[in-house]
Image (cartoon, coloured by chain):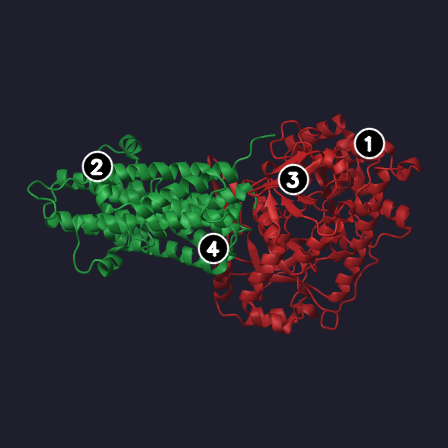
Amino acid sequence: MLSRVADSCFWLSRYIERAESNARILDVNMQLILDFEDQAPHLVQRHWQPVLATLEDQELYNELYSEVTPDAVLEFVTFEKKNPHAIVTSIASARENARTVREQISSEMWEQINRTHLYLRDGRGRADFTDSPIDFYRRLVDQLHAFQGTTDATMLHGDGWDFLQLGKYLERADSTSRVLDIKYHILLPSGEKVGGNADITQWMAVLRSCSGMEAYLKTFVGQVTGWQVAEFLTLHDEFPRSIRFCVDQLDLALHRISDCDRGHFSNEAERLCGALRSTLDYTTIGAVFQSGLHQFLDQTQLSLIQIAQAITQTYCQWKDE
Amino acid sequence: MNGLLKDYEVGDFFDEMFSAPGNVRPHYELLAQRLGEMEDGELARKCLLAEKSYLNQGITFTVYSGDEGTERIFPFDLIPRIIPSKEWAHVERGLIQRLTALNFFLHDIYHDQRILKEKIIPKEIVLSAKHFRPELIGFDVPKNIYIHICGTDLIRDRTGVYTVLEDNGRCPSGVSYVLENRQAMKRVFPKLFTKYPVRPVDRYAQDLLAALRYVAPHGKHDPTVVVLSPGIFNSAYFEHSFLARSMGIEIVTGNDLLVKDARVFMKTTKGLKQVDVIYRRIDDDFIDPTVFRKDSVLGVPGIIEAYRKGNVNLANAVGTGVADDKVTYYYVPRMIKFYLGEEPILPNVETYLTSDEAERKFVLENLENLVVKAANESGGYGMLIGPHATKAEIEKFRAAIIEDPRGYVAQPVINLSRSPSFCEGRAEGRHIDLRPYILSGEKTSIIPGGLTRVALRKGSLVVNSSQGGGSKDTWVLDDDDERGEETLNAQSQSQAQSQVQ
């Protein structure tokens, strides 16, 4: 397929996934704060600050808003057109990419993403948000899930689809690592200790923002501990949002595209991805905590950035001849 | 008449539906009946539904103002235009005749120039045409086809005679709306389709692909065909991608292609892949910065060399613009006689050449009553509608004509035929034109009907979408149906003209 088209498929999919994870993070964070009895402004601020830190948009936020309030953060991450990672901008970018590859994707996929874009643009999204932000984020996530389902059900599972998979799993692995990192940034309220009620509530919120609560409870019956949540979200081999699962899918898609057998690599993207996959396959959560969860997540994010660059260089860029 | 058509004013125009006030033409009877039965607000609701579906499907064009583009739909009028089969057969014969002559003409002027030597057309007219490409003299295009896709604009005058307003032999657009309008109509009026034998239009994409494959270089058996678009910021991008999708081929932009050893390749994830036929929706001027406009960033450097070496074919051919020059238009009836020995089946609109001294004198004396058009502009640009123009505009054109007599033509104002259109809750007469799309491949085929454009603004004769124009579905009825028959007044040579572009 055309290199430009491959690039657009890759980014289209990344933007969709990014919008979805932002919607989840906001949804869960809003619900989480309802559990806290003390709503003093400095506590509320401390509660939302990590969201901005995770999304790495702190600087732009400070330019646009004078203080951290829930309304401002929700506005900034959801509707702020100046924010390149806001949900509306991600959807608009996804749709713009979809427009350039309309002959590659199915009409159903295009209409799904176009409807979502129009929903956010023509005021209906804003109206739903005003009524109930939580319902708004749920609806949005539903629409984006419908896009994933439509994609799997209506598009040829050829190269174009594989580039969509690359974008999706790369972004998702990155997003899960960031969500886990939120927990690192949230300080426990004074007087609370690790393993205490507040700590567990926060870990459950992390699980929920990855839609992982139910799956987790099936795996670790009846108890939530930070250690296990971290293990579940990084190393579980069947949970579709765990970092290991995503990297495995990434690796599979890369090898389908190149037709290279899975034990080998034929380009830099495959080499880097294989290395990351093997780390995730053979490490233990004990080893992760020993070297530091935050450091481990940082390293993972760095590898993902390198893989994305290698994909672009291998398939999407042409030096002018 | 009741319902929507109650109090419908036919006016002093040729009306497509009514032969006289209250008198419906036979082929419109069923439609008039259906419109009459509609409840209050029913058609308005259907309109909203159709619009919403266009919006959701992204069947839009982008209007740029400020830094953010807004997307608009091309307004769609739900009352179809109906053409009986005999009437259509006549139009079809006329269009094929015309396109055949234009193809002969293009081959001739890029080879022996017989028509110039025999002084049927003054030499300087052709050689001075803005879109004449001397670079391609002596070059043989595959199968001698120059205009693979032609969009000829037709109007009907006061007496209903189909008259050619202009030929679009470069990159005619709009066909996607024909296909989408039909889809929308089927959703809105499913029952009417069971009553009317409407000829289908959905073969167009397959016919287009066949025509493009037919002209592959060296008769290559399984050629790679692509659509070349300026990109998503082009207002017709929807159509480019629609056509690529309907044909199942790639849509590419200039940056996706490169030329190596006089061959054109596209950059794919698996390396370079050679391209054989390019349906280009980029004008000659922008297609190759090494040959034509140096500042073009849309084109492909070296593509003309590959074309001249016969390693890639372009549709339409390079240099066809000379055939839709408005001065050349004046000579098309003579071309038909010269190359085919036939009388033109479809007349031209009466046209005055300002390069002719006597005609220029007449035009300059009557500017306030005439329509003046720049010879090489399209899309409604460079045009003066005398009766609607200010003194200053008229004087501007007077100066321009004196400065460059070759650059303009003039035509009398003509009132286009009208068709009932849904406006403000009821049907009102609005002016329309018709753009059929003609494909030249192994055989010449014409999409049954084409794009009917309608000037939705009351009294307006301008059907361009930028000026309040919309479109209608166009129904050509099938042969075995007698309802559609009408005597065709083909003899009446019209003194017709219009300002539609």
Residue B265 sits in which quadrant? top right
Which of the numbered marks, if any, corresponds to residue B37? Answer: none
Q: Which residue is mark 4?
A: A109
Sort mark 2 into few (<14), some (14-19) or many (20+) by Cα contacts within 10 Å.
some
Q: How many tags in the picture? A: 4
Chain the render paints red = B
Q: Is residue B365 visible?
A: no
Write down the chain letter for disc 3: B
Rounded to the nearest angstrom, the CA distance separating label 3 from label 1 is: 33 Å
Mark 4 vs 2, N-terminal side: 2
Horizontal arrangement in the rendering, residue A245 relative to residue B195 (left or right): left
Q: CA distance from mark 3 to mark 2?
A: 53 Å
- Quarter in which the N terminus of chain B is drawn: bottom right
Q: CA distance from mark 4 to mark 3?
A: 29 Å
The numbered mark 4 sits on a residue in which chain? A
Which is nearer the eye, B183 or B73? B183
| Colour green, chain | A
Tell me the kind of residue under disc 4.
Met
Residue that lies at the very extreme toward the left in this rendered image = A191
Q: Which amino acid is tagged 3?
A: Phe
Task: Residue under label 3, please give it.
Answer: B265
Of B96 and B11, nearer the camera is B96
Q: How many residues crowd mark 1 within 10 Å: few (<14), some (14–19), many (20+)?
A: some
Left/right of residue A315 with respect to residue A171 in the rendered view: right
Q: Residue B127: give its label.
A: 1
Q: Secondary structure at mark 2?
A: loop
Q: Chain of mark 1?
A: B
Picture disc at residue A68:
2
